[in-house]
Every structure is written in C-alpha cells, then in structure tokens.
Image (spheres, coloured by chain):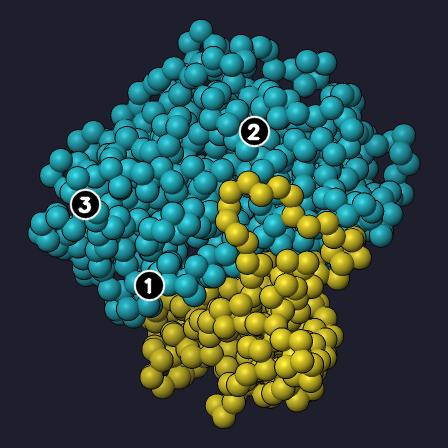
C-alpha cells in the first residue's frame, strides 16, 4: 500500500492537535507555520476551557453544555457537531491533564473549575489566566516529541500562498513561501488541513495577534473553497484600547467576581473608589439579574455601547467602563488571574488590584469561517480540511467564552483522522500528479510576487490596511446599518483599486516582510468584502449581528447559514438550512429566566 | 500653539546575516501610550530617515503584542526587552533599537532563536503520554506543586536570559536558563518525573547545567519573573544526585 502524505497549515491548538493525531496514525505530516508554532495566537487565550465535568455538585452535564452553547449561539450552529464537541470535552480535559497542563487545583488535588459567560455552572478549567498558553505549550511539546522521532517535519517561517488543485478540482498539495529566502515552492500532499485562525487584522486593531489576517482563508475562497457566516464577528466586551492592539481582559475576571460599572452621574470625575457604591450603576447586574456580569459577550458588548453612546455614561465622558476587581482578595487574584493583571499593569502602569480597570469592547473572535461538513471537518474541495477558528462550525452567531479552546482541539482531533482516512482511500495519490500541475501554480505565485516588487505607485500598504480597519471597525462590528454597510463595501472596492498602486519600498528578496504583508493585504480586502456583504444581506438581528433597522431574530427568513463562494472572480452569497434537529429554536432572553 | 512633539528612534540595520550593520535615525510623531512596535509600524508606513532619505521598512519579529508569545525581544537602549511592552514614555531618547546579539541576525531586528527549540528537543522537555485515546484523568497534584510548576511553564522562549548570560558566547554552547528551567518543570510533574533520568543525563552533557557560572543576570531580566536561578540550583542538585547514585539504582 502507498504511504499517504498529509500537510497541516497553522500551528495553534487546532493545527497541533491535528498533527498529533496524524502522526499517531503513523502517517508522515508536514507542519507549516508563519511563526515558530510556540508563538501562535492560541497563546493569547486567557480564561479557560469548558467541559461539563460537574465537579462542584451542581448537576452540570454535557447536555447542559450543549444547550448553553446552542442557545448562546442564537441557534445558528448546526447542532450535531456541537453536541459531539460538548460530549468530547471532558475527555479532552483529561488528555490535557495527562500531557502535563498546569491547571489550577482544588485542595483534593483535582482540577478546579470556574464560572464563565452564558452559563450558570462552574464549567471552565483554567491554568491561571494564561490557559491558552499552557494548552498550546502542552501540544507543542507533544509535537516536538514526534518531531524528534522523525514523524513530523516542521516548516516554521513559511507562509501558505495557495492550494495546488489538479484539473478536476482536487487538492494535491500547497504552494508556500519561505519568509526568509522568499523562495516559492510547492509541496505535494494527499490532504491539507487548514488551521489558520481568526481574521482580526481585517479590523485593523483587535485582540488578535499580528498573524491573524485571514489571508489563507481568503486565498482558499478565491480557489473555490466556500466561506460560511462571515458576518458573525465577536466583539469582546472588555479589552484595553491601544494603538497597536486591543489587549484582552479575560471574561474570567468577571467569572471570579469582577463587576462592570459606570458612575451614575454623567461627568462624575471623582476617582473610582471615592464614588460610593450607591452612586454606581452596575448596569449588567441590573439589566440581567440572573446572569449578571456573566451574560454572553454580544449582550455585554451591546450593553456597554448603550451605556456609553446612548446614555452618555462612559467614564470621564470617554468610551470606557470600569471592570472592578478591587473587592476580591489579593491572594485570590494572584492565584487565579495573575497573567491578565500583569498585562494591565505593564501596559497602563496601574495596579488593577487596587484600582478598577478601564475597558472597552474590541474585535475578538471570528465565528464564521471556512465551510466544513458536519462530520469530517472537510471543505467542499476534496483534499482540503479545516479546523479551529478559521472554520465556522461550532459557535453559531455568538461564541461562549472558553468554548474556543475546546472547539480548536476537537476540530483538530476530528480533522486529523478524517484526512488520513481520505488519503488512504485514494487509489492514486499526489505522487501520480503531473509535475506541470505544481509548476503552473508555483509560477502563478511567483508572478504575483514579481508584479508587486516591480510596482511603482504612491500607495502604502500600511495606510490602506489602516483605512480598511477603521471602516470595518466603525461599520461592521457592534451596530450595523445597511447604508453604512453599502458605503463600506464601496470603500473596500476603492481600496482594492488603490491596492494596484501600492509601493513596497522594499524590493529585496531576503526576509521582505513588506512583500508578504502586501500579499496578505489583498486577501484581507477580499475577505472584508465577504464579511460586509454577508452583514448587508442578513436583515435581522441574531447573536453578534445586530441591526437596529431589524432588531429581532427572524427565523422564518434567516435561520440559515450564509455560504459565500467565488464565481468568475466575484463573491456570491448562497444560503443553506441549519441543522436544528436536536434543540428546537426558542427565543434567546438573558434578561429573564429561560 | 503647542509644538508637536516627536520621538527620535535609531535602528541598527543589517540587510542580511553576512551584511555590514549600519544605523538609521527616524523622527516620528509622538502620541500617548506609544510603544516600540508602534514606532516600527510608523516607519513602515513612511520609510524615510530623519535626514530625508528613502529607505525600506524594518524587518522585525512580533506577534501577540502583549508579552506572551515571546517574539519581539530586542535590545532597546542597551537592554534586552520585549518591544511590545517597551513604552516610549519610559525610554530615554534617541531610542536605540538593536537585534539581540546571542542569536544569528536574519535581517535588521529579526533573529533566529531556533537553537532554543532544538535544545528543548535534546532535553526531552515533554510529558511522554501513551496516546491521545481515552485513558482517564491525569495524576492528582497538590495545589502546592501546581503553584510551584505553573510559573515555570509560563516561559515564553524569548531568549532574553541567553542574551544577558556571559556564559552564552562564541566559545561555549551553554543551553541557558530557560531550557534548564524546563527540565525542572518536567521533572516536577508526576508522569514527567518517571523519566527524569533521561533529562538529567541530557542536562549533564555538553553546554548543560554545569556551565552556569552563577552570574544571575537571567533571573533579573526574565519578563515573566521565572525563578530561573532556583531552577538551575534545583536541576544542579538533581544532576549531582543522579551522577553520584545513578549507577547504583539506574
């Protein structure tokens, strides 16, 4: 029997788990990543990972986890895959525990669990407030072990450019670029699994890392891989605004008892702790008595927008609210939240143990993504799989906190074996494909590079990127109006025109980051249009997608998945039914008991 | 009208590993809460030196911008630090930005820290599991052990402890504090401890723990306040025990 060959693109949690599963099956796997995989964006996840282990005697169950996730996602997610994920979650925690993740412990030596948004149960396992880092390292170590055994080959410092499709539209490998030598090369593979994360950079400033551009997803779309629910973008309620990045302040701060408030009186400029408690407006607790500060993120974010922009109660008249931990004992804060307190202290020079933090919502998570099937993480193009934040499957219209880490790992666990099974079932593999197929794709990509390097216009890629980001943030995040969405799409098309005149200011062929950024920028502009057009078309409000013109969820017309495809160089939106076979849709009301 | 304030930045540039380095100076518009990353982005948006010469954007490593990915370590005003948390207001101008010196320069401020990942491999810095299939829960662990191990597992592999270590030089292959601390971490874990001997044998090899000369610069510079000297002392103790008694019980 021939030996199959698998490629994984992206080395965050999903990619590393996929690699582990492929290597475990005894199949050779090549792992491509822009950064050394230990520096992937999963490292930024803070609060924890959900699994209904019911260790606090609350009667939690995987069925309850499933229901919370579907309800939290406003019934847009296909239900069977979410159910499978919730049922797998307790086993995933066990596996991570065996790998040596330093989860916080109870006095009995068991894993501790804390509260998170959108649930009433202690369901979130955590390692301080750097859980993503700890999980990423555990998987990184297992992959390093396979690497030492010769089962995995890493290509770190390489970026994905395109899939290599044969004449029948089947994927036979990838085309990638070495970011040091700028060499463009093709790599044959029977199947490629994409685990390329979120699209934060499309919004300019977000909580995401620099590499989270969505460039790979966009490149795949332009080669015929469908993209689903692009318009569903999560804006996290509590981030620290910054010019280079919006630094996340984990939901776990509220899970551990943190309270969000503003002064009741507009323009009350007293230092926060001099404002008596009865002159503070704890608006989340008041409006949502049952969930309080732990309503889902879309709800909390819209509440903050209302308080700041409609009621004009932002702290100091600015776009800011307090996230207050000062009533929690220092010892508890240090043991459970140190990682995020350190970030606030380092970047703002203020100790959040003694002074309430000032926060504001920021673009955070990409619910939509590459379309995959319900069983195998397979895309519509044979040989291409996707897992993790880059695909759309698990979070519907709004992701619950601490569900992302579990969905990444679960997606990788499914995609790895599914790709192996597909590869083993092929009668002829990638080695039988004519070399001209690979040469053609390599030349096409080299020509794009050469054209960019030759170009001699007056536009700067960073400037275009910043303009795209500010338009997307202003018009395509928390509150969306059709007129603004139309204007944004026109702006994006203008930027695509201006893109043709960009000047790289760097024509060298060695570690040319500007060339790579310019390539990503084009792909970002295309995907920005997918997000904007999806939002424009969806005339309802559901989860994170909110249109004041259409304030209600509209199941008869819009309980359906947006499926964007690429036809003759144009974006085309199609729709398909959501699988709601397990939990009938019901109204989503966090202000009253459900 | 108040005069527009500016930030003066000097960057040590190098077109490639074997090219001669040179300095370029830039004048940037000052804004509140600037960090060194924002300075480098400003330069990329307008790559013109202070004396009006067109140049290229600066190549540098960065990713998370919140000091948890470990990418953006560089030497700023003579001191190793993470560029994302290096706030302009706290730096003397002109701000001098250079690549770290203990790793090969790729281009400009970007360096190759691959040696650290290779050394993690040599030290077998992992918990060997039998497989990802369901084998139940992991070993129980006291909150005290977790509290000791967790800070060690926050190492971001930035390389700053190697940058400041006098024992890391052209004549020595010292693996450095970060890697030794990982040996301690995995020897602390109940399953990892079953394989402590392999790690100790590796860390007693060339460039291992014996090469530490106790300068203690590592623990001062670590951006995550990892008790690195404690880790070195502990691994040293374990190694000596292994060397003395290993042949008896091995």
Q: Where's residue A106, x and y in %? A: 79, 45
From the image, tell me which residue sits under label 2.
Answer: A87
Of B52 and A440, nearer the camera is A440
Badge 3: chain ID: A
> What separation in Å lies between label 3 and label 2 (alpha carbons)?
35 Å
Question: Mark 2: which secondary structure?
Answer: helix
Badge 2: chain ID: A
Q: Is residue A544 left or right of residue A49?
A: left
Same-chain check, marks 3 and 1:
yes
Q: Where's residue A311, x and y in %? A: 70, 26
Residue lying at the far front in this picture: please name it. B248
Which quadrant holds residue A377? top left
Chain A, colour shown: cyan
**Residue at 43% across, 59% down:** A146
From the image, tell me which residue sits under label 3.
Answer: A429
Q: Residues within 10 Å of mark 2 (few under 14, many from 20)?
A: some
Of A177 and A15, nearer the camera is A15
Chain B, colour shown: yellow
- The residue mark sitting in front, 3 or 1, is 3
**Residue at 55% across, 54% down:** B129
In the rendered structure, which disc, 3 or 1, sits on the residue that comes first in sequence?
A: 1
In the rendered structure, which disc, 1 or 2, sits on the residue that comes first in sequence?
A: 2
For residue A398, above or below residue A255: above
In the rendered structure, which disc, 3 or 2, sits on the residue that comes first in sequence?
A: 2
Badge 1: chain ID: A
Q: Is residue A156 left or right of residue A455?
A: right
Of A82 and B30, nearer the camera is A82
From the image, tell me which residue sits under label 1.
Answer: A179
> What separation in Å lies between label 3 and label 1 (alpha carbons)?
29 Å
Residue A467 appearing in the image: no
Which quadrant holds residue A515? bottom left
């Amino acid at each position: 029997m021939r030996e199959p060959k698998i490629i994984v693109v992206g080395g965050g949690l999903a990619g590393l788990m996929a690699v582990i599963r492929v290597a475990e099956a005894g199949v050779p796997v090549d792992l491509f990543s822009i950064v050394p995989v230990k520096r992937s964006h999963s490292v930024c996840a803070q609060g924890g990972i959900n699994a209904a282990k019911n260790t606090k005697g609350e009667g939690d169950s995987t069925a309850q986890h499933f229901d919370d996730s579907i309800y939290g996602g406003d019934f847009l997610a296909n239900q069977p895959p979410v159910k499978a994920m919730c049922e797998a979650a307790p086993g995933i925690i066990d596996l991570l525990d065996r790998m040596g993740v330093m989860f916080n412990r109870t006095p009995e030596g068991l894993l501790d669990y804390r509260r998170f948004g959108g649930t009433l149960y202690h369901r979130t396992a955590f390692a301080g407030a750097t859980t993503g880092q700890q999980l990423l390292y555990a998987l990184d170590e297992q992959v390093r072990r396979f690497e030492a055994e010769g089962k995995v080959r890493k290509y770190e410092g390489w970026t994905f450019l395109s899939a290599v499709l044969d004449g029948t539209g089947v994927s036979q490998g990838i085309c990638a670029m070495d970011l040091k030598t700028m060499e463009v090369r093709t790599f044959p593979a029977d199947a490629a699994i994409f685990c390329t994360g979120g699209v934060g950079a499309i919004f300019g400033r977000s909580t995401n890392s620099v590499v989270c551009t969505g460039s790979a997803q966009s490149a795949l779309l332009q080669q015929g891989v469908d993209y689903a629910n692009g318009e569903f973008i999560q804006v996290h309620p509590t981030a620290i605004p910054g010019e280079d990045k919006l630094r996340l302040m984990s939901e776990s701060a509220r899970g551990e008892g943190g309270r969000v408030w503003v002064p009741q009186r507009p323009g009350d400029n007293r230092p926060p702790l001099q404002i008596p408690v009865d002159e503070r407006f704890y608006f989340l607790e008041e409006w949502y008595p049952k969930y309080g500060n732990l309503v889902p993120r879309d709800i909390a974010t819209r509440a903050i927008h209302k308080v700041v922009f409609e009621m004009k109660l932002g702290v100091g008249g600015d776009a800011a609210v307090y996230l207050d931990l000062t009533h929690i004992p220092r010892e508890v804060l240090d043991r459970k939240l140190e990682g995020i307190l350190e970030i606030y202290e380092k970047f703002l020079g203020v100790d959040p143990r003694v002074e309430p933090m000032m926060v504001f919502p920021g673009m955070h998570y990409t619910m939509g993504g590459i379309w995959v099937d319900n069983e195998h993480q397979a895309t519509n193009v044979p040989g291409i799989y996707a897992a993790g934040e880059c695909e759309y499957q698990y979070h519907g219209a709004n992701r619950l906190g601490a569900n992302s880490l579990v969905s990444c790992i679960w997606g990788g666990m499914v995609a790895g074996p599914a790709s192996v099974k597909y590869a083993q079932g092929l009668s002829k593999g990638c080695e039988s494909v004519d070399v001209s197929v690979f040469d053609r794709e390599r030349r096409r990509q080299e020509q794009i590079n050469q054209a960019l390097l030759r170009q001699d216009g007056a536009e700067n890629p960073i400037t275009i990127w910043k303009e795209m980001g500010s338009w997307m943030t202003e018009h395509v995040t928390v509150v969306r109006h059709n007129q603004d969405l139309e204007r944004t799409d026109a702006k994006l098309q203008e930027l695509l025109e201006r893109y043709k005149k960009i000047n790289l200011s760097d024509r060298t062929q060695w570690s040319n980051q500007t060339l790579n950024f310019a390539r990503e920028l084009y792909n970002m502009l295309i995907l920005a249009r997918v997000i904007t057009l999806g939002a424009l078309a969806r005339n309802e409000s559901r989860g994170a997608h909110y249109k004041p013109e259409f304030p209600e969820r509209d199941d008869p017309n819009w309980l359906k998945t947006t499926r964007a495809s690429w036809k003759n160089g144009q974006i085309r939106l199609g729709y398909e039914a959501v699988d709601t076979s397990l939990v009938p849709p019901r109204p989503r009301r966090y202000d009253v008991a459900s | 009208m108040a005069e527009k304030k500016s930030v003066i930045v000097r960057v040590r540039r190098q077109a490639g590993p074997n090219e001669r380095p040179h300095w370029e100076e830039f004048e940037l518009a000052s804004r509140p809460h600037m960090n060194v990353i924002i300075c480098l982005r400003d330069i990329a948006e307008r790559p013109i030196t202070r004396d009006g010469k067109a140049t290229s954007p600066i190549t540098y490593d960065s990713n998370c911008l919140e000091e948890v990915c470990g990418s953006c370590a560089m030497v700023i005003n003579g001191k190793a630090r993470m560029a994302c948390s290096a706030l302009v207001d706290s730096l003397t101008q002109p701000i001098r930005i250079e690549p770290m010196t203990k790793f090969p320069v790729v281009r400009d401020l970007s360096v190759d820290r691959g040696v650290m990942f290779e050394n993690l491999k040599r030290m077998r810095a992992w918990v060997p599991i039998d497989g990802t299939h369901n084998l139940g829960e992991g070993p129980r662990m006291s909150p005290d052990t977790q509290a000791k191990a967790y800070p060690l597992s926050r190492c971001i592999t930035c390389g700053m402890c190697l940058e400041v270590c006098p024992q890391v030089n052209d004549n020595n292959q010292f693996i450095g504090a970060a890697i030794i601390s990982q040996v301690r971490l995995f020897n602390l874990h109940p399953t990892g401890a079953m394989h402590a001997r392999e790690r100790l044998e590796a860390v007693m090899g060339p460039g291992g723990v014996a090469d530490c000369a106790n300068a203690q610069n590592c623990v001062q510079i670590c951006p995550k306040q990892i008790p690195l000297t404690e880790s070195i002392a502990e691994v040293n103790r374990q190694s000596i025990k292994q060397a003395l008694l290993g042949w008896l019980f091995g």
